[in-house]
Amino acid sequence: MTAAAPPRLRFLPEGIEVEHGLLWLDAQKPKPLGLVTHAHGDHVARHKTILCTPETAALVRKRQGPGAEFLECRCGESVTVGDLKVTLLHAGHILGSAMALIEGAGGSVLYTGDVRPEGGLTCSPAEFRHADVLVTECTFGRPDHRLPPADETRAEIVAWVHSELESGRTATLLAYALGKGQEMLALLTRAGIPVAAHGTIWNLTDIYRQFGYSFPGSRKLTGKGQRRAAILVPPRYLNVTEVKKNAPLAVAAVTGWSGRARSNRVERVFPLSDHADYDGLIKVAQSVNPKKIYTLHGYAREFAQDLRERGYDADAIPGHSGPPDDGSRPGMW
């Protein structure tokens, strides 16, 4: 007799298959039923049906338009998929981000997607539960990728913005359009700083407002110039006319890749990420306390080795491993 086992996973180039295609996790190609952990483009495909949180559904509709059907499930709630029970849990990455606890008759799997244990200003902290198998990202899966406490970095950002505005320069923060942009918008508006956000950031804030977040004192960046206001803009739009109208600029990047902000115009880099740093990833493993760990993305091989040295049964997934890129890809900011 074969012993009962957790739900069967296959790690394929297009995504993670659960139980012979019953469900797919963050697949890159359209599937009949795809679980989408969050709305960043590298985790979303045009599946026939998308299982996700209501926040992620709203963000995907905003970015992709009509098409997919949605099976919406709030964090802490469960849905039945075949013989499996799927529970979504806060992941702490961006608004609506969720981990998936997949339970079958023989055991359970926790798939983190992108995760940040402490959460942020515009998303809840991660909520961990025990599982037999853990599948986790490893973007910062090396011991030299430890970030300062987020509150310290946030305080430094606010102080820098105040200083630059008082000097007569326009404090310009580079931040990814979804997630980091709204985090910075929340940080600065809570500090009473007027902010003008590039349209790619601003156009998503109505979804955040639908789910209870507000950004008083903020507005959309236009070509008229924004005196005595900070600017938020994704890195690729730094040279657009709307930004240039606000010269002289003081430019800073907000990214976990502190030494990799590729622009000679960047004067300051603030080490803040919406991914878990190395210590955060260790916390994920400790919190879930699984029998088996699979690592993927980023420094998966290195992190799996570290986990084995700590006594875990851990393996990196071939084809889902290798060093992350140098930070130039938008999602890495």
Image (cartoon, rainbow, N blue to C red):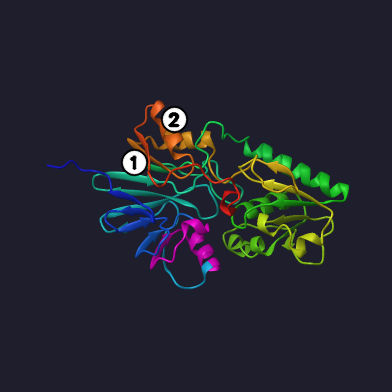
Left or right of 312 in this view: 121 = right
Left or right of 119 in this view: 229 = right
Q: Which residue corresponds to the image point at 67% horizontal and 51% vertical from the top-left?
A: 184
Q: Which residue corresponds to the image point at 24% horizontal and 47% vertical from the top-left?
A: 105
Instruction: Please tell me which residue lies in front, 162 or 267.
Output: 267
Magenta segment, which residues? Answer: 40-63
Which percent across, then down, holds residue 262? Answer: 67, 47
Which percent across, then down, holds residue 131? Answer: 35, 41
Which percent across, then down, holds residue 129? Answer: 40, 41
Instruction: Please tell me which residue lies in front, 312 or 320.
Output: 320
- Quadrant location of the N terminus in the rendered image: top left
Is residue 287 rendered magenta in the image? Answer: no
Left or right of 304 in this view: 227 = right
Which percent across, then down, holds residue 88? Answer: 41, 52
Residue annotated with mark 1: 133
Q: Amino acid at mark 1?
A: Val
Q: Which residue corresponds to the image point at 57% horizontal and 49% vertical from the top-left?
A: 332
Instruction: Please tell me which residue lies in front, 206 or 221.
Output: 221
Mark nearer the N terminus (2 vs 1): 1
Q: Which residue corresponds to the image point at 70% horizontal and 61% vertical from the top-left?
A: 198
| Residue with the most extreme left position | 1
Q: Amino acid at mark 2?
A: Asp
Residue 79 in sight: no
Left or right of 124 in this view: 238 = right
Residue 99 in sight: yes
Gap between marks 2 and 1 measured at Cα? 17 Å
Residue annotated with mark 2: 306
